[in-house]
Amino acid sequence: MTDPTIRRRIYLAGPEVFLPDPLAAGRRKQALCAAHGFEGVFPLDAALDLAGLEKPEAARRISLANEALMRSCDLLIANLTPFRGVSADAGTAFEVGFMRGLGRPVLGYTNTPLDLRRRSETARAGPALPFDCDSATVAIEDFDLAENLMIEMAVMEAGGSVVRSTIPPGAEMTDLTGFEACLAQAQSIMSRG
Amino acid sequence: MTDPTIRRRIYLAGPEVFLPDPLAAGRRKQALCAAHGFEGVFPLDAALDLAGLEKPEAARRISLANEALMRSCDLLIANLTPFRGVSADAGTAFEVGFMRGLGRPVLGYTNTPLDLRRRSETARAGPALPFDCDSATVAIEDFDLAENLMIEMAVMEAGGSVVRSTIPPGAEMTDLTGFEACLAQAQSIMSRG
């Protein structure tokens, strides 16, 4: 029997780490986690002292700290909202894969109602970024999914589904409606196992 | 002592699966793997029969087949060339994380010489995609890296480095100069341990 006083730990993946006040964004998610009986773990929780370090060493410590935080968690909820392109932040996608590789449940939400195919078509219709290797003959995934199938199927296999929300313009990065829906999924998954 | 007749298996991650002839792209990489003493494993090697399946079930089978292929491999080499945005293909980023989560070496190359900061600045200077949650106050990673630090540091921790190449326009998706450099890194890593 599980000790009900031990709260399951959720790694909070997403581009919020790049917001002007990332710790405030983390605290908002952590408060919602607590309200749902979980402990939210934000990437910046490691509270590293990076002062005076060269960039590669600072990057290395952040990476290893985040990997250690993921290993300490029972599941992950990712903000998969498109970030600087048609898909989720690359670091977030990596982290979803990392937790899936560890065999732990991954959940996710995206603050756009558009599926990956629609978004890819929209991007292709606009001006191309000079470094982007996409071109007109390259296939666009068409599985009615919100994200690349490796990511979305990892969520499905965990017993969840990627939550899509239509969000007022300007709040795509901060709206937590989808995050709360993921917490409800997390409760359901954890009560089973 | 390692049996020299058993070739180490390399999972070939990248957006080449979306090319008009993905199997040909896979075979080119597999030939180079063989020339370096490795067995190249391409995501489409599972040769699934998806005829008649609904999209979600087809996506599920592809995902599970690719995860099984990754589990069968000793290391991974990723094509991290920016795809439909400033960063690597989201499925590729997921797969790098997955192999890292399994504790296996990950290597990667990108067919642009521009670092992530420069690419992010270029993208921000152009028209915004309507679904993209980036905005002017969101920080841009500045670690002199080719990719998000979680990805690039995973490569560094494996004993490799992300290979950046300047490629003739139009060949960004298919040039294998960086891939061959990764194979040399793989030989060095595998000879150590």
Image: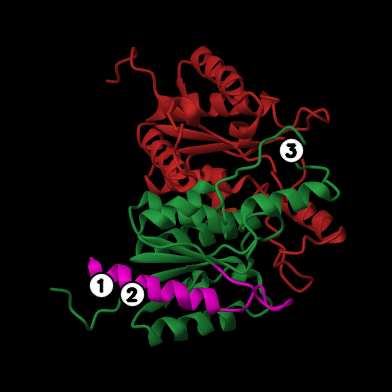
Chain colours: A green, B red
- What mark, if any, has residue A187 been given in the picture? 2
Label 1 lies in what chain? A
Type of the residue with mark 3: Cys
Disc 3 vs disc 1: which is toward the camera? 1
Tag 2 near tag 1, CB within 8 Å? yes
Q: Chain of mark 2?
A: A
Q: Amino acid at mark 1?
A: Ser
Which residue matches tag 1?
A191
As helix, strand or loop, the secondary structure at mark 3 comes to loop
Which comes sooner in the sequence, label 3 or label 2? 3
Q: Position of residue B108 (x, y in %)?
A: 58, 37
User: Label 3 neighbourhood size at 10 Å, few (<14), some (14-19), many (20+)?
Assistant: many
- Alpha-carbon span between mark 3 and mark 2: 40 Å
Q: Residue B29 bears which disc, if any? A: none
Choose top left, top right, bottom left or bottom right for residue B122: bottom right
The residue at the point 82 percent across, 27 percent down is: B168
Dividing the picture into quadrants, the one containing residue A165 is bottom right
Residue B94 is inside the magenta segment: no
- Image quarter where the N terminus of chain A lies is bottom left
Instruction: Work out whether disc 2 and disc 1 sit on a shared chain.
Output: yes
Whether residue B80 can be seen here: yes
Range shown magenta = A164-193
Name the quadrant of the C terminus of chain A.
Answer: bottom left
Query: What residue did someone put label 3 on?
Result: A133
B178 versus B91 height, above or below: above
